Every structure is written in C-alpha cells, then in structure tokens.
Amino acid sequence: MKTLHNGDKSQPHIKQFQSSHWFVELLFGVMGALVLTLIVAVSINDASANDKNAISNKSGISDAALIQVGKADMSLLWLDIYSAKLFSIDGKYQANRFPMTLDIQYHRDIDAIDLVDATIEQWQHLGFTEANIALYRQQLVNAWPDVKEGDRLTFRVNNPEDAAFLLNDTPYYQVSNAQFPEAFLDIWLSEKTSRPELRNQLIGVN
C-alpha cells in the first residue's frame, strides 16, 4: 500500500517538472530568436555602413588636402540660389586637372527634377549633343536630391573614373560614367558657360 501511495503522491511533481521544462524551452526559444534578430539587424547596418564607406573611400578626397581656388554666389533677380566654392590640389585652376571639388550650398528649397532640368538646359547652352545629354541624364537623376535651404551638395572628382556626390558630407551617389565629371563641371568652368562672371570668381580670375 505504501508503494502505491508514494507512486500516486509523486505524479504532481512529475507533471510540474514537465510543465517547467516546457516553459524553459519556450523561454530559451524566444531569447534565441531575439538574439538572432539582433545579429541580423547589426549585420544589415554594418553592410549599409560598408557600402557608404566604399563610396567615401573610393572617392576619398580629403577637403583638408585641397585648397580653395575661388567662390561665387548665384542669384536670379533678387533671389539668392546658392553659393559655390571650387577646390584644387594647389589652389589654382587648370582645366581637367584632378583632384578637384565643387561645393554648392543652397539658399532655397529646390526639387530634384528642377535641378535636373536646369542642368540639361546648361548642357544645351554649351552645345552638347542630345545623345550625350540622354547618356548623362540618368546620372543626374541619381545624383540630384531634393535640396533644402542650407543643404550642401559636394561633387568630388579624384579622376574621371572616380567621382562622387556627397550630401551634407555624407556619400550620396557614385558616378559610373567617365565622361560625366567633365561634363558636369563644364556648367560652371567651361569658357562657354552662361555665367562667365561666376566662372571667373570660381577660378580666381579678378
């Protein structure tokens, strides 16, 4: 009788142990899922950071290594549009000599599509063929963001095959066309520019 009595008495302890074992497995399962989620999130963030660093390092021209050539302000009637600065390796301008950086700070909000259209108009003024404009346009669509008052867009050219746009010092777009850097800079630096006074100020000609 004792054996039967003890056996019956032990049943609740067995059930309690089984219930606790199930709870522990569930707890560790949840914790494991959380840890895995954190690992994946960190990996994604690291990958994103590495992509940005790849752009930054590939076009890694240090502003400290370049010297300002000149600066100019762009206005239409009474509206201030932007201020621009040109930098080179020795503080002197020489056409198509790199590295070179053009830094533009905007004084107004401007939509990307308006910047694209204005750039295309300048290329048409410079006599670019429609075929070339069509080729460069896709670069523009990717490179021009919507800008807000106070934003800085920097175009850094290490060489024709290595150029990138930065928005407020953050890598934004890596150029993938070797002819694009010269074509883009020509808007401000070509002798045929629509703004010769602005050009002279940028290249340091008084």
Image (cartoon, rainbow, N blue to C red):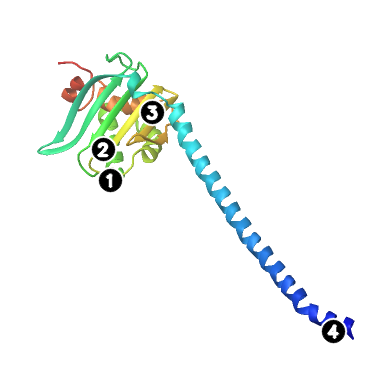
Identified at 60% across, 52% down, the residue is 36
Q: Which residue is mark 2?
A: 118
Q: Pointer 3: what residue? A: 180
Q: Earlier in the sequence, mark 4 or mark 3?
A: 4
Q: Nearer the viewer, mark 4 or mark 3?
A: 4
**Which amino acid type corresponds to the residue marked 1 in the rendered image?**
Asp
Q: Are marks 2 and 4 in contact (CB under 8 Å)?
A: no
Give whichever of 67, 163 is nearer the camera.
Answer: 67
Query: SS of the residue at dot 2?
Result: helix
The quarter of the rendered structure image containing the N terminus is bottom right
Location of residue 35 in the rendering, given as x and y in whole percent from the top left corner: 59, 53
Q: Are marks 1 and 3 in contact (CB under 8 Å)?
A: no
Which of label 4 and label 1 is nearer to you?
4
Specify which label sits upstream in the sequence, 2 or 4: 4
Q: Position of residue 41 (x, y in %)?
A: 53, 49
Q: Secondary structure at mark 4?
A: helix
N-terminal label among 1 and 3: 1
68 above or below 12? above
Query: Could you tell me which residue is drawn at 29 percent across and 25 percent down?
Result: 186
Residue 96: percent from the left, percent from the top?
Answer: 34, 17
**95 horizontally vs 160: left or right:** left
Quickly name the residue at label 1: 111
Whichever of callouts 3 and 2 sits on the residue coming sooner in the sequence is 2
Q: Are marks 4 and 1 in contact (CB under 8 Å)?
A: no
Gap in Å between the C-alphas at discs 3 and 2? 16 Å
Residues at marks 1 and 3, CA–CA distance in whole angstroms:
21 Å
Estimate the spatial distance between the alpha carbons at disc 4 and disc 3, rounded to whole Å.
91 Å
Residue 44, position in %: x, y? 53, 45
> How far is the residue under mark 4 from the one under mark 1?
85 Å
User: Nearest the camera: 25 or 72?
Assistant: 25
Q: How far, Cα to Cα, is label 2 from label 4?
A: 94 Å
Choose mark 2 or mark 4, whichever is in front. Answer: 4
